[in-house]
Amino acid sequence: KIPAEYVRLTEDDSVDKCLELMSNFWHIMEPEPPNLVISVVGGAKNFKLDGRNRSIFSNGLTKVMFV
């Protein structure tokens, strides 16, 4: 079975369990820890981007990863 690429958490979820998931199932610390972990807060219910705004968002996110 292929592990999921993301996880949805609530404020009641254990940080230790989340780290255990990322370490033991995603192997996120191998071969070395990531330089960036992105946390998205809020729902995507009304989050729709057209082509131009999607491109701006994607480019901005990419720039942040390489700062």
Image (cartoon, rainbow, N blue to C red):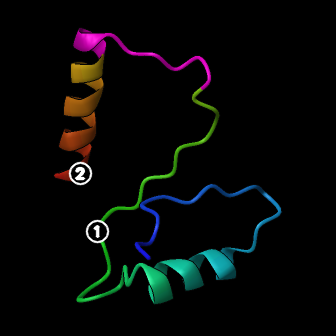
- Magenta region: 45-53
Task: Please state which amino acid type lies under the numbered disc 1.
Answer: Asn
Q: Residue at x 19, y 31 (%)?
A: 59
Between residue 21 and residue 57, name the one nearer to us: 21
Query: Is residue 21 rendered to the left or right of residue 4?
Result: right
Measure the alpha-carbon separation of dots 1 and 2.
8 Å
Q: Check disc 2 and report its element: helix, strand or loop.
A: helix
From the top left corner, tell me how far across and down residue 31 is, in percent: 23, 89
The tag earlier along the polypeptide, 1 or 2, is 1
**Could you tell me what secondary structure mostly forms the magenta stretch?**
loop
Q: Are marks 1 and 2 in contact (CB under 8 Å)?
A: yes
In the rendered image, which residue does mark 2 sit on?
A: 65
Task: Please state which amino acid type lies under the numbered disc 2.
Answer: Met
Label 2 Cα neighbours within 10 Å, binned few <14 / some 14-19 / many ≥20:
few
Quadrant of residue 2 within the rendered picture: bottom left
From the top left corner, tell me how far across and down residue 14 is, in percent: 74, 74
Q: Is residue 17 magenta?
A: no
In the rendered image, which residue does mark 1 sit on?
A: 35
Q: Residue at x 51, y 51 (%)?
A: 39
Between residue 54 and residue 5, name the one nearer to us: 5
From the top left corner, tell me how far across and down residue 40 is, in percent: 53, 44
Q: Is residue 48 magenta?
A: yes
Q: Residue at x 44, y 76 (%)?
A: 1
Q: Is residue 53 above or below residue 18?
A: above
